[in-house]
Image (cartoon, rainbow, N blue to C red):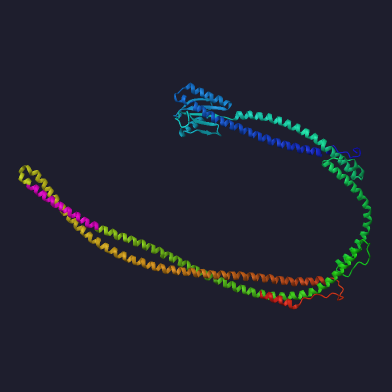
Amino acid sequence: MSETATPVPLLSRFNTIFVKCSLLFAVAMLVLGALLLFRFSSLTERIVTDRLRDLAHHTTLAISHQMADSMQFKVQEKLEESLHIALEEAGENGVYGAIFDLEGKLVMQLGSDDLGHAATARSLGTEVLRTNAPLEVNDGFHVAFPIQKKEAMPTHGVFVMLWDPAPSLAHLAEERVRVEIEAMIALIAILVGVSLAVRQLVTRPLVRLSDTITLVGEGRFDAAGTLPERGDEIGHISVSVKTMSARLEEARRLEDIAQMDARAQADVVELLRRGLKALAEGDLTAGIETSFAEKYEPLRQDFNAAISKMRQAMSEVRSNADSIQSGAEEISRASDDLSRRTESQAATLEETAAALDQLAASVKSAAEGAKEVSKTVSETNTMASENGRVMQNAIGAMSEIEKSSDQINEIIGVIDDIAFQTNLLALNAGVEAARAGAAGKGFAVVASEVRALAQRSSDAAKQIKTLISGSSQQVKSGAKLVDQAGEALMMVVTSVDHISDLISGIATGASEQAIGVSEINKGVNNLDQVTQQNAAMVEEATAAAHMLKSDAMSLNSMVSKFEVAMDGSVEPQMMELSDITDRANVAQAI
């Protein structure tokens, strides 16, 4: 079988299912391997980073607790030992360690000589001393803890550790490269094994099946019997090829019979073509008189029957087309009249709606003005009420001033009494000084001055009393005027209340009128819209009537092209003129 098969070109050998399946599997394995390696790399990198971050936190915290006593008692050896332990536990990831006292001074440092690390450590130590709370920055790799034996205990300083995850990540990258190389070797081995299996189980049976199908296509139907029996998809294809071969052999036998039948069919088609050509030219009297073969005779009879039925239908259509044209002309005239009347009615209603719009706007403006007046009167009433309360307060204040004037008069009376008593005491003192002779001269001078002072106090009290008396008269007069003003203002408030009630009533009435006019306006607008819609509908009906008239004329013109035997065998169904008139009346009523 392989000796008769067409040789396959060398370049086409790579365009096979085996190569395609192998490439597809290789691509799938490479994509899967790449995804797994990527996930493995990111997962291991995240795990290493998290572990280092936790180690940095716990190591720094433990060392800060450990060096609390050493820091408290300033034991340098212990502090240095603790700092060495911290960097040893950090290993190659520990960059720099520093200890600061409570004043922020550097006590001890160990690790990198980079000034930037020292500055970073000092900044972290200062922030921890300020907040007295742990601080972790740079994704948790720069850590600073207060030096205290336990939390909530006194702080003796700050311990700062700077970590760098780069060395561990570099080791991880080297290990990842080794794992990737091993995975690639395993992947290549799997691809080779799968490719060999696909070649043995799929490719070779498919090549044999392809050769057999080629032989069957060349007409060697016995070649399909050599295909193997298998239970998989290739076996199903083999069964299908055998079935196809048997059917092709049967089809070759039937082909000869079909050729004989085709010649008879060609004669039938030619006669039908001639009949259909005459029918296409409008000749409904042309039939097929030549008899067909027994197999195709019903076709000729059906064609002649169809021609006869069409001839009868065209006779009826020609009669009805005349009636439709007449009715369409009547409907068109009625629609034109109705359209003109509807347009006139719509224009009148539109003018009415515009006038109502202006009236509604005027009433609305009046209502809004009444509301504004009512609001203004209400505000005036409020202001008058406020002024009334202010006037009442002023009356009370004038009463208090009058009472204060009376009290001042009493005080002035007390001052007069004091001046009188002082004058008497000064007089007695003068008499006693005269009795004392030369020894009482100084006392006599003092008594004279006291008497003069008492006299001036009495005169001043009299003047104040006179002024207070005048003020009291003016205060009483002012209090009386304020009372009169308060009574007048209360009368104004009462009048403003009455005016406010009247304006409110006017505003309410105007609002109700505006609402009523607005409702009327809405109704007229709705009626205008309905009328416009009716006008549009009438225009559409008019256009439809004109279109019906045009279509009827076109139908008459088209039907007149057919040749129909006018033997009176078919009575046309005429449309009554009364029906057309009734439809026109209905359209006019709309």
Q: Is residue 409 magenta?
A: yes
Residue 210's place in the image compared with 278, above or below, is: above
* Left-right relation of 193 to 283: left
Between 215 and 457, the one lying in front of the other is 215
* Left-right relation of 244 to 555: right
Res. 456 visible in picture: no
Q: Quadrant of the N terminus?
A: top right
Residue depicted at 38% across the width and 62% down the height:
383
Q: Quadrant of the C terminus?
A: bottom right
Res. 340 visible in picture: yes
Dominant secondary structure of the residues highlighted in magenta in the image: helix
Place residue 175 in its image quadrant.
Answer: top right
Residue depicted at 92% across the width and 59% down the height:
266
Residue 514's place in the image compared with 1, above or below, is: below
Q: Is residue 400 magenta?
A: no
Magenta region: which residues?
Answer: 403-431
Instruction: Give the number of marks.
Output: 0
Place residue 532 in its image quadrant.
Answer: bottom right
Task: Where is residue 465? Give x, y as percent.
Answer: 19, 57
Place residue 462 in its image quadrant.
Answer: bottom left
Task: Where is residue 589? Give x, y as percent.
Answer: 66, 75
* Left-right relation of 473 to 197: left
Residue that extends furthest to the front in the rendered view of this protein: 231
Task: Where is residue 339? Give x, y as percent.
Answer: 67, 74
Task: Where is residue 284? Give x, y as percent.
Answer: 87, 69
Residue depicted at 71% across the width and 31% down the height:
183
Residue that extends furthest to the bottom in the rendered view of this protein: 578
Residue 199's place in the image compared with 537, above or below, is: above
